[in-house]
């Protein structure tokens, strides 16, 4: 087989393939074998009739037509792999020679992944929340802890926000008692806003012995209820004094300073994770804004399909079908697909941009990197590395893993070079971030599917399986 690749306009290439007569004759042999399995010839078991007999009975054209239809897509795939063509859509195949006899030649025009440029990627500036807790953040947590260990003390004054009042509460609607709004001794925190805004308004400034009648809107229901409320007791929260002794009583620490330090570290741990997630998200968003090219429609459609498949798997894990989800959310399938399309296009642009960064920075993945990734994947799936490697090779996923690793390295490069500031514009020290604690890149490489948004560059099998590569 001889093959060449010629670039065309519009992110397309023409793959030209030539087959000599003896090579294509093997495909014709396979075609006759397939025909033999489908027809009954007296004196022969299914699939055992010889080619010469079949050729005499049906003529050579039937097998040749069958061979062209069945084998040309395979020759096309071989040519694509040979030249490492990064196809993203189904090809349009045109037979240019050998339709009836002789050597066979055909052209396949196919869309490929565009190679783009993102000028300015090295000077990005992103804003994220500061991972360093302030003294106010720590004090807020101390105050919350004080509230947990506070005590209620009865007071002889009007109620204010935060006080706990003991009331009798009776609500009616159309002169009928409302279930859940009937209580003679009900402790309610003024300002809680959990029943009706009008209840909080009436209780603020009320005293023991006050009887209140008013109409209010029951929160979250749209119902209007008539309230009758009698105030029986007003209590305020008495917060404990912040001392070393108190710190020892409410925690495992002996001093208040130790407690504050622990609170600060706990907050910082959460903030670091949140900051890294925000950094990754905003760095990619900023990179996407530099992309002027439109996302190729085949890649967008593939990304949408992948997201729909992921949604279906998550719903299935929860015991819900896609139809039930659409009914529960009041969404049509068309609306769901439309809602996913914008985010899918952004994801495609992000992938193209990260590939461009990898190209510009000469980021390459060596065999040692690939080995380490396979070992990590083997640990996650609890299999031996050799078994994982063989399965990946069988599914033709090794190039996909290499491509995925390269894209991740490009993102790492971006995170190392982007300028990071807090909302006030102050620089954030990378030492305060845990950049190694990124998301788990456990893509489903071990299954042969069309999940192309993370490693779309080389899974040629998937493109061809869907492609319907029937010769014209």
Image: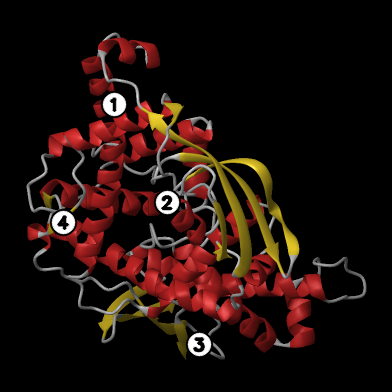
Is residue 137 visible in the rendered structure shown here? yes
Residue 151 left/right relative to 133 = right
Q: Which residue is mark 4?
A: 126
Q: Are marks 3 and 4 in contact (CB under 8 Å)?
A: no
Q: Nearer the viewer, mark 4 or mark 1?
A: 1
Q: Nearer the viewer, mark 1 or mark 3?
A: 1
Q: Are marks 1 and 3 in contact (CB under 8 Å)?
A: no
Is residue 72 visible in the rendered structure shown here? no
Q: Which mark is residue 112?
A: none
What residue sits 23% from the left and 67% below the top?
Answer: 288
What residue sits 47% from the left and 47% below the top?
Answer: 393
* Rendered view: 459 above or below 382: below
* Spot occupied by residue 43 in the image (x, y as percentages of width and height): 92, 70
Q: Nearer the viewer, mark 4 or mark 2?
A: 2
Query: How many numbered callouts?
Result: 4
* Spot occupied by residue 237 in the image (x, y as percentages of width and height): 40, 31
Q: Which mark is residue 263?
A: 1
Which of the two residues, 52 or 283, is positioned nearer the viewer here?
283
Q: Which mark is residue 204?
A: 2
């Amino acid at each position: 087989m001889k093959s060449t690749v010629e670039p065309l306009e519009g992110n397309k290439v023409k793959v030209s393939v030539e087959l000599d007569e003896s090579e294509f004759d093997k495909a014709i042999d396979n075609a006759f074998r397939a025909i033999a399995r489908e027809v009954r010839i007296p004196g022969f078991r299914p699939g055992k009739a010889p080619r010469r007999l079949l050729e005499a009975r049906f003529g050579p054209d039937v097998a040749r037509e069958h061979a062209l239809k069945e084998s040309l897509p395979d020759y096309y795939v071989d040519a694509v792999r040979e030249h490492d063509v990064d196809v993203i859509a189904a090809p349009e195949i045109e037979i240019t020679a050998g339709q009836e006899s002789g050597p066979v030649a055909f052209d396949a025009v196919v869309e490929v992944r565009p190679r783009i440029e993102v000028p300015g990627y090295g000077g990005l500036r992103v804003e994220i929340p500061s991972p360093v807790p302030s003294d106010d953040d720590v004090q807020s947590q101390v105050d919350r802890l004080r509230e947990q260990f506070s005590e209620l003390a009865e007071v002889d004054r009007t109620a204010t926000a935060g006080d706990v009042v003991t009331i009798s509460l009776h609500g009616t609607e159309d002169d009928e008692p409302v279930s859940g709004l009937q209580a003679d001794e009900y402790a309610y925190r003024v300002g809680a806003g959990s029943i009706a805004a009008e209840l909080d308004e009436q209780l603020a400034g009320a005293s023991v012995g006050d009887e209140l009648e008013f109409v209010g809107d029951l929160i979250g229901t749209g119902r209007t209820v008539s309230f009758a409320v009698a105030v029986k007791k007003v209590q305020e929260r008495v917060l404990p004094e912040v001392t070393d002794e108190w710190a020892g009583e409410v925690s495992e620490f002996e001093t208040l300073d130790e407690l504050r330090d622990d609170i600060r570290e706990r907050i910082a741990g959460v903030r670091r994770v949140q900051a890294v997630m925000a950094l990754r998200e905003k760095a990619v968003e900023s990179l996407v804004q530099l992309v002027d090219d439109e996302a190729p429609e085949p890649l967008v459609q593939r990304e949408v399909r992948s997201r729909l498949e992921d949604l279906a798997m998550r719903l299935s894990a929860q015991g819900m079908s896609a139809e039930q989800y659409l009914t529960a959310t009041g969404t049509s399938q068309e609306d769901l697909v439309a809602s996913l399309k914008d985010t899918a296009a952004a994801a495609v642009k992000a992938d193209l941009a990260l590939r461009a960064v990898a190209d510009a920075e000469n980021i390459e993945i060596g065999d040692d990197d690939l080995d380490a990734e396979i070992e990590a994947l083997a640990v996650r799936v609890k299999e031996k590395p050799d078994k994982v490697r063989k399965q990946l090779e069988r599914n033709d996923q090794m190039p996909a893993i290499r491509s995925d690793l390269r894209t991740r390295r490009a993102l790492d490069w971006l995170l190392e070079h982007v300028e990071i500031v807090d909302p006030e514009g102050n620089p954030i020290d990378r030492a305060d971030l845990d950049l190694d604690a990124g998301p788990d890149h456990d893509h489903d490489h071990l299954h042969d599917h069309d999940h192309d948004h993370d490693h779309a560059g080389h899974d040629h099998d998937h493109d061809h399986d869907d492609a319907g590569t029937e010769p014209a």
